[in-house]
Image (spheres, rainbow, N blue to C red):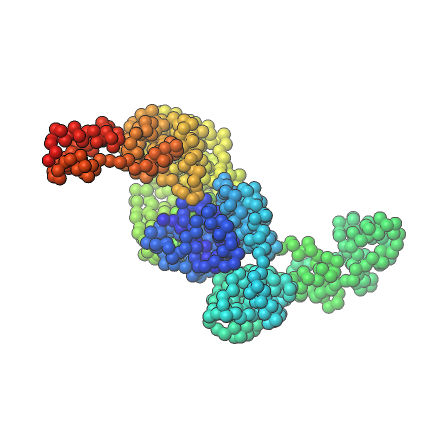
Amino acid sequence: MKVIVGHENLDLDALGAMALARYLHPGAVLVQVGGLEGRMREAVNLYADHLGLLPAEKVPLSEVTEVVVVDTQQRGRIGPFAELVGKVPFVVYDHHPPDEDAIPAAAGVVRPVGAATTVVAELLAERGLVPKPPEAELGYAGILEDTGRFTYPGTTASDHRAAAWLLEAGADPGRVRPLVEGRLAPEAKEVLEELLATAQVVRAGPYRAVIAEAKKEDYVPALAPLAHTVADLFDADAVFLLFRLGDQRLVIARSRRGIDVERVLKTVLGRGGGHPRAAFARVELPLGEVRERLARALVAFTGGEPTLAERMTPSPEGLPPDLTVEEALARMKKRGYGGMPVLEGGRVLGVLRRRDLEKAAMLGLGQAPAKGFLHPPVLLPKDAPVSLAERALKEGAGRVLVTDGGRVVGIFTRTDLYQREEEAPGLAEEVLARLPAGARRVLEALKARFPKAAIYLVGGAVRDALLGEVGPDLDLVIEGVPAAEAARALAEALGGEAEAFPAFATARVRLPGGMRVDLANPREERYPWPGALPEVRPSTLERDLRRRDFTVNAMALRVHPEPPLLLDPYGGLSDLKARRLKPLSPVAFAEDPSRILRGLRLAARLGFTLGPETREPIAAALEPEVLKTASKSRLKDELLLALEEPSPQKALTLFDRFGVLEKVFGLKPDEGFWQAVRRLEAGRPETLPPPEAYLYLLAATAPDPEVFVRTFGLSKVYAEGARRLREPPDDPERVRELGEAFVWAFLARYPERENWLSRKERRLRGRDLLALGMQPGPAVGKILREVAAARKRGEVHSFEEELMLARKLMEAYGSS
């Protein structure tokens, strides 16, 4: 049983991310941790049919095989599922930075965007998985809520793109608006009045913070939005709301700029979770003491904010005071400025704006003195913080003059405000930052145990991290220590089981949380013939990357020694950006034809395209003389993996388009097959058809199902299922007896037979024989067995025919 959970005190962002995440994890159950408040109760009721939320207390933890967590990484916020950390795989989709309480997830995506829903929506868009309108609406509402309708400081271009994509998927802004806006309940209005009456403005370095408190005897839902209301009313940079609600004491903090409220809560109160812009804590201290501690900490706050000296444009040009409007306007146009100060003998008279001068010229005042249109100057010292200048820009015609000892040394404009000089992290650091906590824990353990070794993240792990997602399998190359020794050390440090493969210089560790770590020493391979197992010998990292299949899988990230370094010797990064799949060598597919299936499966999942340089080698590798020596086992494994993809239909469609189904597997799917596949996919994400259902449908397209099954080492039951799909039996039990997966396949192929299949056929029973006049005894059992055997041979097909046969047998055996 797979479950998808958000944090306790569910909000629209968590709910929207949960609804969309099910498209990445079809068949998973959405689970509600904790209660619902205000608008959330309305939202859940409105979309109940599409969500199917299950309360956490109704989920048997012993049956959970995987936990998907959205909008948090803190194990303390996922209720009873925290007990499963380290026992089952965890996948995390979040937009908050990790902390010491972060779940050691095996997979997932963490991106610094405005909403967790954005993280999931971007993955769906990249993979071509379009949500249904109800789920799109929930996602759209989540983005609007967590970005403050795109006004909060943490809002990114990704949030806008994700919201637009959800609108295209069918989200209705009219239905979303009441959920996001809401109305303050009467009890919330009373709380707001009390907050305003107790509000205390504290100067925190260059910022304004507000601390306010309120008390109620009962719990009041949906109080977090009040923080933004208070911030608006006081023009505050940060707000700390203290609540005593019954026996609970809570702190809700929000920040617009400059103040990391999560760090403040953890520093001052020793607890709290969230991120720099939004944090929450439960406290045991009296609210008065919490207020005093926060006020003291904020007064001492410095922020480390850049000053005007760091951001200003130095040595600004000025205009003399005796210019006409036309002369001043000409100078501004020549220099491309929107405004300039007017200086006289080192003294600043004011600031002229270009648009004011253009209006004056249009009114026929071109020869009037320009100084008649001056704006009063706003002067700030060079050591003033940028945030102080941000406010002053509103008063200074969009310009602040920077002084040093009374002398103008620079000018600060809105352009300077928006041109942040903070250097974005390098690509290697960015990839490391995207790794889930569980992956980082693995790397730290290896670095600590083997400080002199060179450790590289390679292959699909680098590709997925660059795309923004890391799966539960980590692929590492290590130099300076045998792979088997590294695997044993990792298993000792983190638990789990290590397994070595000396012939291939590789080892594998399975960790308790579900992560699989593959370790290898640098090596190169040689294939004696197509499909053969490779001959392996030690080599360099560059040659190790060269032996791989596609350029996007031939990148490596040096994790140790530092600094991190991204190695891309074959242009994988540019192919990744173009979402293009290209083989490293034209003979890669001929060496191992299973790479064709792997590549098409990858292209289907990630939405990659294949160019001519890929199509022609695929066609060459599908020639009979190549395929006859290919490993049937590896080809079968790749086919089965394709049937486990989030959308097997996409992978099978590409297989068919490139001739793989016919040339590799001898299958000839018709329109009936594709209709059945579409029916299987139609129920996603709520339902998850078993992969075996697709395999039954595929086997039925083989000219001889038994040959297909025997060639690729599949169970004989698929050949039997193929026969029953081609010639549907008259007895529903003949369908049911092959198991659930066959029932899925049968109903996908024959949806009109659903009622027929669900009908239980009446069978002959002992009491029917007694009603015919038989005496109780061994003869009753003997006749029932003979009738059952006749039914199995197809000699009787209904209860009436069974009754007729029983009468004949009674005549033969007697009635006693």
Foreground residue, 528 or 578? 578
Residue 284 visible, this orientation: yes
At which x and y percent is residue 359? 82, 51
At which x and y percent is residue 695? 35, 34
Q: Is residue 526 above or below residue 264?
A: above
At which x and y percent is residue 430? 51, 51
Residue 425 visible, this orientation: no
Q: Residue at x 33, y 27 (%)?
A: 726
Q: Is residue 762 left or right of residue 752?
A: left
Hey, which quadrant is residue 597 in on the image? Answer: top left
Q: Is residue 307 left or right of residue 582?
A: right
Foreground residue, 759 or 412? 759
Q: Residue at x 55, y 45 (%)?
A: 171
Q: Is residue 522 left or right of residue 226?
A: left
Foreground residue, 20 or 484? 20
Foreground residue, 505 or 392? 392
